[in-house]
Image (cartoon, coloured by chain):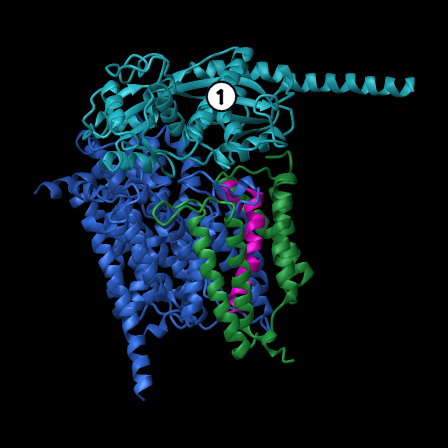
Amino acid sequence: MTFRSLLVKTAGVLLALTTAAAAQQYPTKPIRLIIPFPPGGSNDVVGRLIATQLSERLGQQIVVDNRSGAGGVVGTELASHAPKDGYTLLVISIAHAVNPWLYDLKGRYDPLKSFTPVAILASGPNVMVVNPGVQAKTVKELIALAKKSPGKVGWASAGVGSFQHLGGALFELQAGVKFLHVPFKGGGPAMIDVVAGHNQVMFSSLVQTTPQIQSGKLRPLGVGGKKRSAILPDVPTIAEAGVPDYEATNWWGIVAPAGVPQAVVDRLRKEIAAVQTAKPVLDAFAREGADIVQMTQPEFAAYMASEMAKWGKVVKASGMKVQ
Amino acid sequence: MNLEFLERKDFWSGAMLIVIGGGAVLIARNYQFGSSLRMGPGYFPTVLGAMLVMFGVYFVIQGLRSGEKLTSSWSLRALIILPLSLVLFGLLIDRAGFIPALLALIISSAAASTQSKPIEVLAFAVFLTAICVIVFVWALGLPYELIAGIW
Amino acid sequence: MDLFNNLIFGFSEALSLQNLLYCFIGVLVGTLIGVLPGIGPLGTIAILLPITYGVPPVAAMIMLAGIYYGAQYGGSTTAILVNLPGETSAVVTCIDGHQMAQQGRAGPALAIAAIGSFFAGTVGTLLIALFGPPLADVALKFGAPEYFSLMLMGLVAAAVLAQGDMVKSIAMVVMGLLLGIIGTDVNSGVQRFSFGFFELTDGIGFIVVAVGVFAIGEIVSNLGEAQERRVLANKVSHLFPTLQDLKKSWGPILRGTGIGCFFGVLPGTGPSIASFSSYMLEKKVAKNPDEFGRGAIQGVAGPEAANNADAQCKFIPMLTLGLPASGVMALMLGALTIQGIQPGPQVMTQKPELFWGLIASMWIGNLLLVVLNLPLIGLWVKLLQVPYRLLFPAIMAFSAIGVFSVNNSAFEIHLTALFGVLGFIWMRLGFPLAPMLLGFVLGPMMEEYLRRAMLMSGGDPSVFITRPISLAFIIATILILVVMVAPSVRKQREAFTD
């Protein structure tokens, strides 16, 4: 008995030593970066941008692996089962905090416990836009318009449970209005419909909407961030414009399967922090209307938990459900 | 009793349509049907499934009466081996890597033909795998591990 | 003349050594990924995007565009040679193109596909240059009711796709519609027929179904033939189309181009609808519709022209409005933003070298594609001399990699195997496969547009006839029905009087 337990302990120590040694040399082989969305989406753009820069700093190739499906659940589940050696990382976004309310994840993964938070990368607010033909020029006017004819103002979203849907549902809840929710397959088609005037309002991600705003095809009423956006300085925040507590911000971060050696996480955090302030990344994010965000590991974990709680309430109150 | 209809294309066509259509209608009962003016998620599948069942009944009746017989020349071997070799590829590619999965696929699918020659198949499998590695992984940059752990 | 000057300017931009080189690289890579099934422009552009960061914007866009329309070109090659649709838009090309190959006419089939594509590409490019902005505005008039009525027309016309048994064809369209419904319902968010698989929540991929039933099902069938006959004949009569081939093809190419441009401008239609529509039209207007499905060159010329015109015109909403009509176009918009250019109508005035250079490069790229493809025809045809016992494992390998590359999903490989079995069963029972694929493409869109139209009208079905564009399609649908039903009714009446 004692001999066996000794053996187990020695083995454990040896294992810990080797993993610690391995962590020091990390990375010694290419790293897989799972993006749980198809190419072209915001997760993909952010993930690839960071991957290119990070791989230069780490001196190892970072292989971007798009594993889309079920709003990110498929790729996230895959990452949760990956070896805990730091050679599999996952790009997450607000969807990570929303999916547990939309899908039955029992027996698959726990959005908080199955992962070690590595670093939050950036955040980008949504923007409330209307077709220029709509009478309302401000958020208050639109609220009045919607109250006059409840369930008549057409609100296009990128699909049930999407960021565009969440932002609108939060607005409905806090402003006490009811739109006619018209879901689309993705943000592009939804925006086309609002530009064309078939629908009136959209809570689009700022990143995808600036071109349309600047060319006057869409009129911005308010941005969903805590403060005004640098690329639309004249547009008030929705909170300023009449819905005091409103905040809808998409964010992107990197996590690893739970149990990754702390040394690996530290190395990654150090390099990611450097990448975040590198000029090409700063420029790219600024152009897209996104802000660099830096948090400590516990802050990031707490932020994820608070986002989960916040959007869980919105999902329940609005009755959106995927299953 | 005349069981000749069991050899007819139309009978089996009808049976296939009834099974798939009927199955769709049954499952779609779990989805809200709605009405013609406010269609729920169950509306389309129910209507389409019912249409398939109707087509199926039509074919079964045709098949009971007369019709073309199923031809006899087909290869059970190919029907079993080819899909299974794809499944094998699917199981191996995430676990063992691109090269083992591809070799396994090519060699096992070649076994579906009675005309394959072992040496030739092996040589061809190596040759084709090499081409695929060059084209897909190196030239097009697809993100696959060549052999588990090696990129 | 303004346009003339602009085009000259564009050509001088596109013909610079650097841009020409990127154009060539683009079309070359595009042809390659087009030939290979599954691997599409979307994935490839995503992978190559970081490379373009260091390249000037014009060159980057020229290369990415080249990949995109080059893929449409290449897709037809595998469709014709081995009955494997390399791109979704090439499915229709399989029907008659592969028959031609089996009759030893792979050369003319490939050549007419290239010629048709080139002509369509030229017209598409001119259209963007001449009428880009107004066309984009017209396209925006299409809302849910218009799209639904358009799809309905397509569906009714689909009966023309019938080869042999009309009832079986229609049953297969319904089968396709039903398969297309699998996945998350856009309108309610309910998951339908997903059987607890999260992989099914986004529906079944088109490539999975197409490769499964066409490639795998076909191989299983072929191996069952008594002698495992060499599927592709040795006798190659000639490599290039005869005068008669060309005579037969110019009409389909013209009509296909028109159809492709029409669907291309509309952001809400997928890439395969244009080629399906062209095929149906050609079969309807042909003197001997019986030839279709047995190697009719019109069935290659029309759809190939249509899919290339569609691909070119998909640039119109992107370039003139900054609106993405497809995933690929969304990526291109992303590429522009990364280059520091705000996409949208102002691109034309603020960055004329980009706008006109890109347009001119598309024509040059199309020319390069013909120059690239015609000499290759001999090589491709030689490839068919490979014994089938080696050819089919190779097709299996390319199919598997192709399907896997779309989502890196092993689940989809297994699903492909399942569709291989289904495809084999359907073939043996005498069900045609192309109508099923059309239903599969149209199904989800039709349902989506119908329910969205009803949702937005508050449950009032009159939207379909009070909106003029929608009404026009409904009337056309009724006309098509009358034209189709009339002959059979007349025949029956004659049979009675006899």
Quadrant location, the N terminus of chain C = top left
Q: Is residue C316 visible?
A: yes
| Residue C408 lies in the magenta-colored region | yes
Magenta range is: C404-430
Q: Colour of chain C?
A: blue
Left or right of C230, for residue C452: left
Q: Is residue C244 above or below residue A4?
A: below
Which chain letter goes with mark 1?
A: A
Principal secondary structure, stretch drawn in magenta: helix
Counting from the top left corner in percent of width and height, residue A5 is at 87, 19
Q: Residue placed at 47% from the left, 58% from the top? A: B50
Q: Colour of chain A?
A: cyan
Residue at the outermost left position: C1
Q: Is residue C367 visible?
A: no
Q: Colour of chain B?
A: green
Q: Secondary structure at mark 1?
A: strand
* Residue tagged 1: A253
The tally of labels here is 1
Counting from the top left corner in percent of width and height, residue C3 is at 12, 42
Left or right of B111, for residue C415: left
How crowded pointer 1 is (Cα within 10 Å; few <14, some 14-19, many 20+) is rated as many
